[in-house]
Image: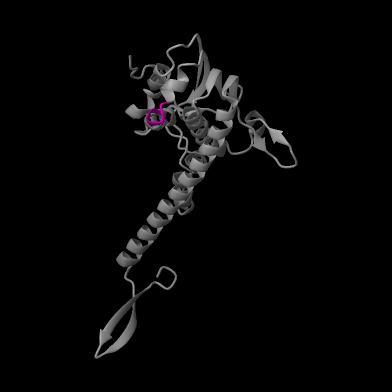
Amino acid sequence: MLSTKRRRMHEKRDGLSITTEAQLDPGELDEAESTFDRLVSQRRQQEKMRRDESDVQRLADALRMLGMLDVLALEAAVDQGNHNQLLPTSTAACEWNPIWVRASQVYGIVMSAIARSQIRVDTLTIYKKSLRCSVPTFDVNKLLPGLGSTNFAAAAQHIRSLALSASTKVETDAQKIADARAGMSEVDDADSEDETETYTGSLSDDDPAAVAEDNYPGIARLLKQMPNLESVHLHLYNTLKGSAESYVKGPIEE
């Protein structure tokens, strides 16, 4: 329909099956394109969920076999091929947002696998040494209900040391980023600086998404799952175009 810009109609008349095609008007074409984009987005999301579930299960099986770990450290690197890897700090000239997107996905997979396997971990570090890579506080908060359903608290009570590099709000939904880029490419008079920032998923410090309530309680809620912590190292990476003051003074659950 989208390629031909025509709508095919079938009807029976006097015992005969008749097929006709009618030209779509602009409104019908826009609706068809919107429906198509929505269905493609849903399919991609379903495929991603299936891939993530498979990754969680495989990692959980491996952790279950180990039973316990003194240290579980999660760090980021950029695969350059031929067994050559670079830390994110070595890719300053490259786009940073894909690293953030994947880092958030891997964080969710690892935390879910810990909950599912019930492994005993003494020290957990999340991107402590990855200076250009953190988990957005929004994503930390978003994952917690799923962790709760798999009894993450039972595994987390064994954690005695936590290091976590978190960040202000960053768009980590790959499909939303792709849609934003497609929209920007259609704007001929877009300012080059704004175009780059939109492409990377960076937000201004007064953007509603950047100051939404769900950005703030995630860290506190995560810490509540770890009642036996003896040491905590938290780092906040400001990705906003402006101040991160709202994150420092944001609401904190007791």
Question: Which residue is at the far right?
Answer: 82
Residue in front for this viewpoint, 239 or 2: 2
On screen, residue 138 versus residue 119, left or right, reads left
From the viewer's perspective, is 254 left or right of 229? left
In the rendered image, the vertical position of residue 62 relative to residue 243, given as above or below: below
Main SS of residues in magenta: helix
Q: Which residue is drawn at 64% across and 28% down?
A: 89
**Residue 199 point in image, percent of width and height:** 50, 42
Relative to residue 144, is residue 52 depicted above or below? below
* Residue situated furthest top in the rendering: 230
Q: How many numbered marks, from 0 up?
A: 0
Highlighted range, magenta: 147-151
Q: Position of residue 233 (x, y in %)?
A: 52, 14
Residue 72's place in the image compared with 35, above or below, is: above
Residue 87 sits in quarter: top right
Asked whether 168 or 144 is in front, the reply is 144
Horizontal side of 78 relative to 17 (left or right) equals right
